[in-house]
Image (spheres, helix red, strand yellow):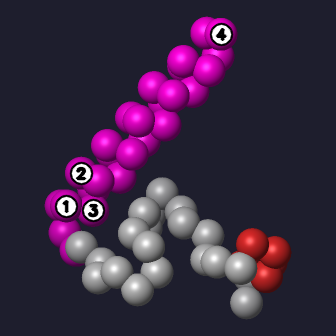
Amino acid sequence: MTPYEALYGRRCRTPLCWCEPGENLILGPEVVQQTTEKVKLIQDRMRTAQSR
């Protein structure tokens, strides 16, 4: 068990795997597309927070 899992009671979701535990993993270019979309969303939200 990782320290994060012990502390929060769930697995850490990394940019490499955004799906919930137990979901089927999407293989291939779909993973790259989903990861790119999530990174863009995070960057947009960070820009918004920094501009305040």
Report the disc number at residue 33.
2
Label 3 – label 4 distance at C-alpha: 32 Å
Labels 2 and 3 touching (C-beta < 8 A): yes
Residues shaded magenta: 27-52
Mark 1 neighbour density, 10 Å: few (under 14) some (14–19) many (20 or more): few
What's the mark number on residue 31? 3
What's the CA distance linking mark 2 and mark 3?
Answer: 5 Å
SS at circle 2: helix
* SS at mark 1 in the image: helix
Amino acid at dot 4: Arg
Q: Residue at x 24, y 73 (%)?
A: 26
Does the magenta run of residues contain 19? no
Distance of label 1 from label 3 (alpha carbons): 4 Å
Q: Quadrant of residue 5?
A: bottom right
Q: Image check: 1 left or right of 20?
A: right
- Do the numbered discs 1 and 2 sit on residues whose CB atoms are within 8 Å? yes
- Identify the residue position indicated by label 4 in the image: 52
Q: What is the C-alpha distance between the residues marked 4 and 1?
A: 34 Å
Lower sequence index among marks 4 and 2? 2
